[in-house]
């Protein structure tokens, strides 16, 4: 009788047909995450750098409208890439990169190694050919057709609707977090007056190598990399006003203590503003508190 | 595994896997996440299945592992999901309200729920449950015994002695 009752009860626990149909559509693709280090981290050895040729726009930190040869790392290998600035039918500038192929076999196979994508991609990076290091950079805006303005924190806070510097106060006072960013944020407009770049980067440092970085934008996701860390999960926060916030959190364990996090990243969007919060050597409960402080101001 | 076989496997086992995942997660969205991960594992695996019985046990074993990892993750422990602060909705596709047996089973601790489910719903033996969950048979027996006692305490006469 118990089994019959149990089966009758749990026969009713089923997935929706829609969810089952989605399962049928699943396809396995080898995981290729586009990952770029935006800064040197203490546990950098744990990170993996991978680039997909089709999705990467490569541009040289200097130069525009010219063909320039740069070094790019794609799928873990170094390539020489010739860059040429082009414009698509919508008037968007983009850079097309052609890998300078030295492999005889590929030349014989006439492999098309061109790399092209429009400037809206968030996966741009700059190559420093002198040091051989890669660093993230904002999308390239042609100075001929754009101009910049400097906004102070009050102006940026009013524009975003949140005050990030104010929100950091929720972290424990013993962390001694201090704002180490600049006094002004640079925003970019097209000559016609359209705001095209509004990304604000707030950086805070505290004692014992504690760091918080907050990237914010109303125009697009403000980050230019994905981190491949030990764990990643979409999770939910319930805010005071009842809204449910969906946050993607990735975290890296400490090498000497697999139960503690050295670094974690939270990506989310709320009321039209995109956020990325990175925390290093900070207790993870602080992330919850910080997000709530930020959004419930 | 070819596409036809994969789709047939989804149609046949998705709900079975979902129920086991639900026993761990106790909410629809997380359980569906686990199910998706299980089928991704199926797509990736090179495991050759001897028969359907073997395949199902493999799927349930992967489900248990995926669900345990999911529940053990820091963020899962830290964040309260919507379903645990609000009455669950959409779990029971046809019934209007969860039954008392459902409530009783969901109130058991996590280590008992999958054992109970695999025994009462999937009809697995103690030995098979031990293989699927990768625990000792004695552990299965102990958990089953304790779960039954707890269910008896909650459900009183409605739950028959075994």
Image (tube, helix red, strand yellow):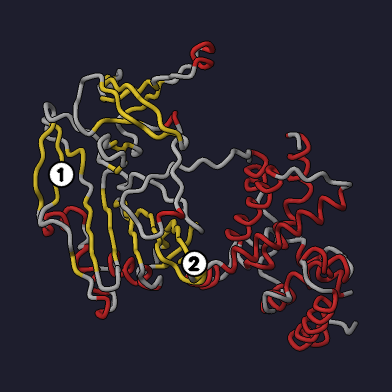
Residue A146: image quadrant is top left
Viewer-proximal residue, B122 or A223?
A223
Is disc 1 placed on a helix, strand or loop? strand
Residue B19 in the image: state x and y as whole percent. Answer: 72, 61
Residue A164 in the image: state x and y as whole percent. Answer: 22, 62
Left or right: where A69 falls relative to A248: left
For the residues labelled 1 and 2, the Cα–Cα distance comes to 35 Å
In the picture, the quarter occupied by the C terminus of chain B is bottom right
Q: Dot 1 falls on which chain?
A: A
Left or right: where A164 falls relative to B2: left
Viewer-proximal residue, A45 or B118?
A45
In the picture, the quarter occupied by the N terminus of chain B is top right
Q: Is residue A49 above or below residue B87?
A: above
Residue at position x 78%, y 54% from top? B58
Residue at position x 35%, y 64% from top? A280
Viewer-proximal residue, B81 or A33?
A33
Residue at position x 25%, y 70% from top? A206
Residue A125 in the image: state x and y as whole percent. Answer: 31, 38
Residue at position x 30%, y 28% from top? A70
Residue B20 in the image: state x and y as whole percent. Answer: 72, 63
Q: Dot 2 falls on which chain?
A: B
Which residue is under mark 2? Answer: B75
Left or right: where A19 falls relative to B159: left
To the question of a shared chain for discs 1 and 2, the answer is no
Q: Is residue A268 above or below residue A82?
A: below
Viewer-proximal residue, B149 or B47?
B47
Is disc 2 placed on a helix, strand or loop? helix
Residue B109: image quadrant is bottom right
Which residue is under mark 1? Answer: A187
Which circle marks residue A154 in the picture?
Answer: none
For label 2, the crowd category at 10 Å Cα-Cα, with few meaning under 14, some 14 to 19 and many 20 or more, is: many
């Amino acid at each position: 009788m118990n089994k019959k009752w149990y089966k009758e009860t749990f026969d009713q626990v089923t997935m929706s047909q829609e969810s089952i149909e989605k399962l049928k559509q699943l396809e396995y693709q080898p995981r290729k995450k586009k990952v770029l280090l935006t800064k040197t981290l203490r546990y950098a050895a744990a990170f993996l750098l991978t680039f997909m040729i089709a999705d990467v726009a490569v541009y040289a930190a200097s130069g525009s409208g010219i063909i320039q040869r740069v070094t790019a790392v794609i799928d873990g290998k170094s390539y020489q890439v010739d860059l040429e600035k082009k414009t698509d039918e919508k008037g968007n500038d983009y850079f097309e990169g052609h890998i300078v192929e030295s492999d005889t076999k590929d030349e014989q196979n006439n492999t098309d190694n061109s790399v092209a994508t429009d400037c809206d991609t968030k996966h741009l990076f700059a190559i420093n050919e002198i040091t051989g290091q890669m660093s993230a950079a904002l999308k390239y805006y042609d100075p001929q057709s754009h101009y910049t303005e400097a906004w102070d924190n009050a102006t940026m806070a009013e524009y975003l609707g949140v005050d990030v510097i104010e929100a950091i106060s929720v972290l424990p006072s013993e962390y001694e977090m201090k704002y180490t960013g600049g006094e002004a944020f640079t925003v970019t407009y097209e000559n016609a007056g359209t705001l095209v770049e509004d990304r604000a980067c707030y950086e805070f440092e505290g004692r014992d190598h504690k760091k918080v970085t907050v990237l914010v934008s109303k125009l697009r996701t403000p980050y230019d990399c994905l981190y491949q860390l030990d764990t990643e999960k979409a999770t939910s926060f319930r805010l005071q006003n009842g809204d449910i916030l969906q946050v993607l959190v990735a975290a890296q364990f400490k090498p000497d203590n697999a139960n503690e996090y050295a670094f974690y990243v939270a990506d989310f969007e709320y009321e039209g503003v995109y956020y990325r919060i990175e925390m290093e050597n900070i207790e993870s409960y602080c992330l919850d508190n910080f997000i709530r402080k930020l959004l419930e101001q | 595994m070819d596409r036809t076989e994969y789709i047939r496997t989804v149609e046949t086992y998705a709900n079975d896997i979902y129920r086991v995942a639900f026993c761990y997660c106790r909410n629809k969205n997380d359980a569906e996440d686990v199910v998706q991960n299980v089928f991704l594992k199926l797509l990736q695996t090179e495991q050759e299945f001897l028969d359907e019985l073997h395949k199902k046990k493999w799927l349930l074993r992967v489900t248990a592992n995926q669900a345990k990892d999911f529940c053990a993750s820091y963020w899962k422990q830290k964040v309260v999901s919507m379903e645990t602060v609000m009455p669950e909705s959409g779990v029971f596709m046809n019934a209007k309200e969860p039954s008392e047996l459902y409530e009783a089973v969901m109130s058991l601790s996590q280590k008992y729920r999958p054992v109970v489910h695999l025994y009462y719903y999937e009809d697995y033996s103690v030995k098979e449950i031990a293989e699927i969950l990768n625990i000792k048979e004695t552990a299965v027996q102990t958990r089953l015994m304790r779960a039954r006692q707890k269910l008896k305490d909650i459900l009183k006469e409605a739950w028959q002695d075994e």
